[in-house]
């Protein structure tokens, strides 16, 4: 199995553990940025498992027919069902028009605070702004 998941996210120890449990599957990590990944796809040498930035790249992969519909696999699985997933996973659903509903075409790997916005409540409480804080991201950037 070829993957673009980098060593920082899929360690050699994890690979060895997986390969011990599934000796008929060997994992090969391929270093690739988005451009190289698209070139591999165009040339017919796409990796089996890729890691993409969901928000930025997911729509491109699905609308180009590059993502596999996972619903049939959920239907057959004895290990994981769609109902086992948290609502955040619904981002990886696509109905042919928008993400968020329809069939699953991906799954989140993890959640991390690297895409989280934090606000300084003291700044908003200082009187410089008329509210105790923004209602949403657009209002946050408008207030700053």
Image (cartoon, rainbow, N blue to C red):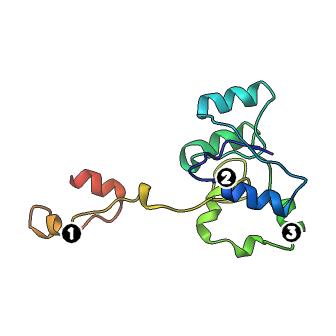
* Residue wearing tag 1: 121
Image side of residue 96 versus residue 51, left or right: right
Q: Nearer the viewer, residue 52 or 2?
A: 2
CA–CA distance in space, label 1 to label 2? 43 Å
CB within 8 Å, label 3 to label 2: no
Mark 3 and mark 2 lie on one chain; the one further toward the N terminus is 2
| Foreground label between 1 and 2 | 2
**Residue drawn 78% across the image and 24% down it:** 43
- Give the residue at the far left of this rendering: 127
| Disc 1 element | helix
CB within 8 Å, label 1 to label 2: no
When the figure is inspected, residue 129 is found, relative to residue 32, above or below; the finding is below
Any mark on residue 30, and which?
Answer: none
Image side of residue 7 versus residue 65, left or right: left
* Residue wearing tag 3: 77
**Residue drawn 9% across the image and 61% down it:** 128
* Label 3 Cα neighbours within 10 Å, binned few <14 / some 14-19 / many ≥20: few
CA–CA distance in space, label 3 to label 2? 27 Å
Percent from the top left, x then y, of residue 92?
A: 66, 56
* Residue wearing tag 2: 12
Tag count in the figure?
Answer: 3
* Label 2 Cα neighbours within 10 Å, binned few <14 / some 14-19 / many ≥20: few
**Residue drawn 59% across the image and 53% down it:** 9
CA–CA distance in space, label 1 to label 3? 46 Å
| Foreground label between 1 and 3 | 3
On the question of residue 130 being in view, the answer is no
Mark 1 and mark 3 lie on one chain; the one further toward the N terminus is 3
């Amino acid at each position: 199995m070829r993957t673009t998941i980098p060593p920082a996210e899929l360690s050699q120890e994890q690979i060895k553990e997986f390969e011990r449990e599934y000796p008929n599957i060997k994992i090969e990590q391929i270093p690739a940025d988005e451009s190289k990944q698209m070139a591999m796809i165009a040339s017919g040498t796409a990796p089996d498992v890729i890691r993409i930035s969901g928000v930025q790249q997911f729509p491109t992969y699905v609308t180009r027919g590059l993502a596999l519909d996972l619903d049939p696999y959920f239907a057959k699985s004895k290990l994981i069902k769609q109902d086992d997933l948290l609502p955040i996973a619904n981002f990886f659903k696509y109905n042919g028009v928008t993400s968020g509903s329809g069939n699953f075409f991906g799954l989140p790997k993890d959640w991390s605070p690297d895409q989280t916005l934090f606000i300084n409540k003291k700044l908003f409480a200082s009187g410089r702004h008329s509210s105790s804080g923004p209602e949403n991201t657009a209002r946050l950037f408008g207030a700053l």
